[in-house]
Amino acid sequence: MPTVYQLKSRFQDLLRPLCKKLATAGITANQVTLAALVLSIMEGAALWYFPGSALPFLLLPLILFLRMGLNAIDGMLAREHDQKSDLGAILNELGDVLADAALYLPFAALAFVSGELVVGLVVLGIIGEMTGVIGVQIGASRRYDGPFGKSDRAVLFGLCGFLIGLGVQSSILFLVLFAAGLLLSALTIWNRAKAALKERASA
């Protein structure tokens, strides 16, 4: 099913010159991974401690875009500049779910947003990423099937953050958006598990 993740290769092509410069400067994939996590935690803290301020919410789409860029760069540094490591694999997977939690859980504290839906989205997001990793455990590839992967969650929360920053506080609107995200997250878990089993069976 279609997902924002399918645009990754084009995004990487744009970032490849910068990636080469970083590699030449001695920047490692693990350093970039940790930088993305620190950036996410800082933004998450701003959202949590200043829920009445528009600026952190308006900045969220930019922070999410920067995080996406850093995530793409750390992968290219690892694959294309001989920086793959077991530690890097652990940091990459844990960093993603920790960053998601830091950036998205503050939405649950907003009075006009369903906290249960937000927490559910974060939990299903973690389960979805775990399901993707389990593919490797059973002998398939790391699964990134959609329709609602990491990049798609970023688009949803980035949009919601921007709307909140503009002063939109419609409980119904955010209920519909987050409920849709919850259903798509559940479907993503199903699709990843199904695809991993199918790949394994055909191997």
Image (spheres, rainbow, N blue to C red):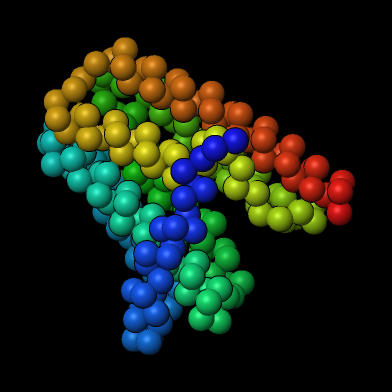
Residue 19 sits above or below residue 96 on the image: below
* Residue 128 position in % (x across, y down): 59, 40
- In this rendering, the count of numbered labels is 0
In the rendered view of the protein, which quadrant contains the C terminus?
Answer: bottom right
* Residue 167 position in % (x across, y down): 14, 25
Residue 183 sits above or below residue 33 on the image: above
Q: Horizontal placement of 40 versus 129: left or right?
A: left
* Residue 88 position in % (x across, y down): 54, 70
Q: Horizontal placement of 203 versus 29: left or right?
A: right
Instruction: Identify which residue is drawn at 29% across, 31% down.
Output: 160
* Residue 24 position in % (x across, y down): 38, 87
- The quarter of the picture where residue 49 lies is top left
In the rendered view of the protein, which quadrant contains the N terminus?
Answer: top right
Task: Compare residues 135 and 10 and report the one nearer the observer.
Answer: 10
Residue 160 sits above or below residue 129 on the image: above
On the question of residue 41 being in view, the answer is no
Q: Horizontal placement of 165 versus 37: left or right?
A: left
Instruction: Identify which residue is drawn at 40% across, 71% down.
Output: 16
As drawn, which residue projects farthest toward the top? Answer: 172
On the question of residue 91 being in view, the answer is yes
Instruction: Identify which residue is drawn at 27% across, 44% down.
Output: 61
Instruction: Identify which residue is drawn at 37% across, 67% down.
Output: 15
